[in-house]
Amino acid sequence: MGESGDRQRCGFVAVVGAPNAGKSTLVNRLVGAKVSIVTHKVQTTRTRVRGIAIAGDSQIVFVDTPGIFAAKRRLERAMVQAAWAGIEDADVVLVVHDASRKNISDDARMVIEGLADTSHRPVLVLNKIDLVKRERLLALTAQLTEAGQFSEVFMVSAETGDGIADLTEFLAARMPIGPWHFPEDQLSDVTLRLMAAEITREKLFLNLHQELPYALTVESEGWEEFKDGSVRVQQTVYVARDQHKAMCLGKGGRTIRAVREAAQAELEEVLGQPVHLFIFVKVRENWINDPERYRMLGLEFDA
């Protein structure tokens, strides 16, 4: 498949929506591999992540974007700006909505209204249908299509895979004719260093509570391959306060140890080789206002 250049198609699909709509889970399901980290906390995705899927002669490049919401802090503003920027060059825009929510949130309405000012007629994807009765889905569809101009509506469950095949077939047929942008076996444009840092950040999110996850960042600062096929990865978790450092470490180092073990196990699965993961936690009070941190994440500092 995909070998005949005159039949090849390739295009970009922007995946947008309010926080916690299930965008990253959907992208991972469409790609068939984990390219974006997922947690139950909102605003997990901080930058645009591209996941790449092949469907017949079509290469579909999914752009997983941060959730769109009423941003207040600098990092939040940069994340939302990245989400809107992801729409500009897309061939298709998917608006993902959490169908299990009782009401259409203000953030969801902000997304729909914002798209009205673009040239796109987006595709509505109602996600988490496994949690909702059919009557509710039909009523919700009517509400959303009244609020925005959608070209198509799909009902899916990124968790179970229901409806994914139909959505993939639809998107494949709508990719522009042209050569593939990436090798056939490439699943993402995220570097291994960034993916490793994101995996550790995901495990921190899952092990920490309250506001702390939003006040930290992770960087892979060392990467050394050994002759025996293993790799040594050194990472630093930057936090804004001493008390945040103590929370990351946990009593007797239990929290950071659990994070390291979980991250190392997933890294070994992703890389297919033994990993020696070392994590250090450091206080850098103003990291959230450091332009270099934003550059590394592909975010605009002055958004």
Image (tube, rainbow, N blue to C red):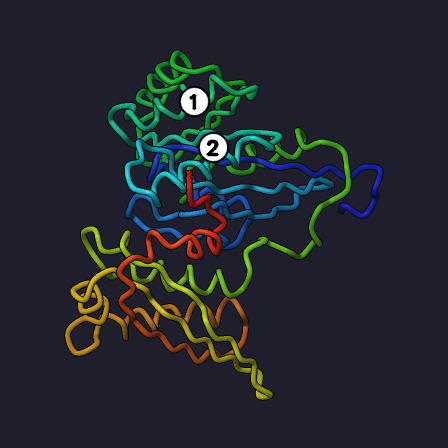
Residue under label 2: 84
Q: In which quarter of the image is residue 157?
A: top left
Residue type indicated by callout 1: Gly
Residue at the top extreme of this rendering = 146
| Residue 129 visible to an observer of this rendering | no
Residue under label 1: 114
Taking depth in this image into account, of 197 and 127 the one nearest to the observer is 197
Q: Reading the chain from its start, which is encountered first: label 1 or label 2?
A: 2
Rate crowding at label 2 as few (under 14), some (14 to 19) or many (20 or more) other CA atoms within 10 Å: some
In the rendering, at what x and y percent does residue 192 appear? 53, 64
Taking depth in this image into account, of 189 and 72 the one nearest to the observer is 72
| Residue 137 visible to an observer of this rendering | yes
At 48% across and 56% down in the image, what residue appears? 296
Rate crowding at label 1 as few (under 14), some (14 to 19) or many (20 or more) other CA atoms within 10 Å: few
Q: Distance between the residues labelled 1 and 2?
A: 9 Å
Marks 2 and 1: in contact by CB < 8 Å?
yes
In the rendering, at what x and y percent does residue 240 appear? 25, 60
In the rendered view, tell whether residue 143 sits above or below residue 287. Answer: above
At 66% across and 36% down in the image, what residue appears? 11
At 84% across and 37% down in the image, what residue appears? 6
Secondary element at tag 1: helix
Q: In this view, does 52 lie to the left or right of 105?
A: right
Q: Residue 198 carries which label?
A: none
Secondary element at tag 2: helix
Taking depth in this image into account, of 70 and 60 the one nearest to the observer is 70
Q: In which quarter of the image is residue 277?
A: bottom left
